[in-house]
Image (spheres, rainbow, N blue to C red):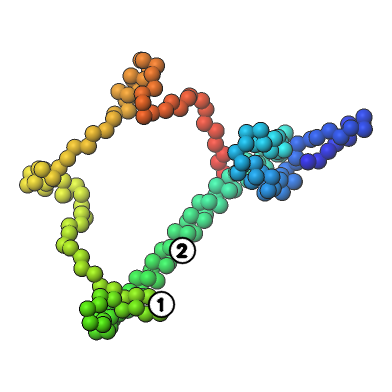
Amino acid sequence: MPKKSSGSGKEKKVPATPDDFIDRVKDAYVDGALAKDDEKELQDTKRRFGITDRGSAAWAAGKIAEAEAEIKRREMQAKAYVTDAERWLERLKWLFWEALKEWARSNLDYGKRSVRLPTATLAFRDVEARLEVDDEEALKRWAIVECPYAITTVEQVLMEPLKDYWAKNNMVPPGTREIRAGENFSVKG
């Protein structure tokens, strides 16, 4: 942390400036304090970083907004990357799936259901017939009339009456926890 001379020969600690914030944020000391979850060490670490003026506040808020934007960018990039890999898989299956299946069937050892290759195993297994739901609403409408025993009702706790009870009786019901009123703070880029 930078030190400033007070004129008395003693060194006085001053908060970090935005120029050296980034080095300190990446500091192993911060990571160590967070990993230990030691309240005193966490508070000591936080004191190393000071928001002292508009510049340091703008810098810190900008870094938070930048990190949030980077997460969104990476999520989109990952989604595009996965989509590209899925397309590649679809192409490969379109080209080779049926041919591999046919080859495997003709190369099974007697009584075996799989062929082991150096790069993968080609295997057959029996699958029972089943139903797969494509349109749940259409299925519900049909089942109510034709197969009512297939319809169930789900019990759930309604929050509005629960909140009224909590407000009236000032009692937190078992299975819940109170989140105290306050203000929400956000940083938006």
Residue 181 image point, x, y percent: 48, 24
Residue shown at 69%/45% (left/top)? 29
- Tag 1: residue type? Thr
Viewed as shown, does residue 176 lie left or right of 129? right
Viewed as shown, does residue 124 lie left or right of 121? left
Residue shown at 24%/69% (left/top)? 125
Q: Mark 2 points at which residue?
A: 81
Q: Which of marks 2 and 1 is nearer the N terminus?
A: 2
In the depicted structure, whether residue 125 falls above or below residue 30: below
Q: Badge 1 local density, few (<14 within 10 Å), some, or many (20+)?
A: few
Quarter of image, res 94: bottom left
Q: Badge 2 local density, few (<14 within 10 Å), some, or many (20+)?
A: few
- Tag 2: residue type? Tyr
Element marked by disc 2: helix
Between residue 18 and residue 4, name the one nearer to us: 4
Q: How many labels does the image show?
A: 2
Element marked by disc 1: loop
Q: How far apart, in angstroms, are the residues tagged by discs 2 and 1?
A: 24 Å
Residue shown at 58%/45% (left/top)? 65
Residue 169 image point, x, y percent: 36, 15
Residue 54 in view: no
In the depicted structure, whether residue 3 falls above or below residue 26: above
The image's mark for residue 119 is 1
In the depicted structure, whether residue 20 falls above or below residue 157: below
Residue shown at 34%/70% (left/top)? 90
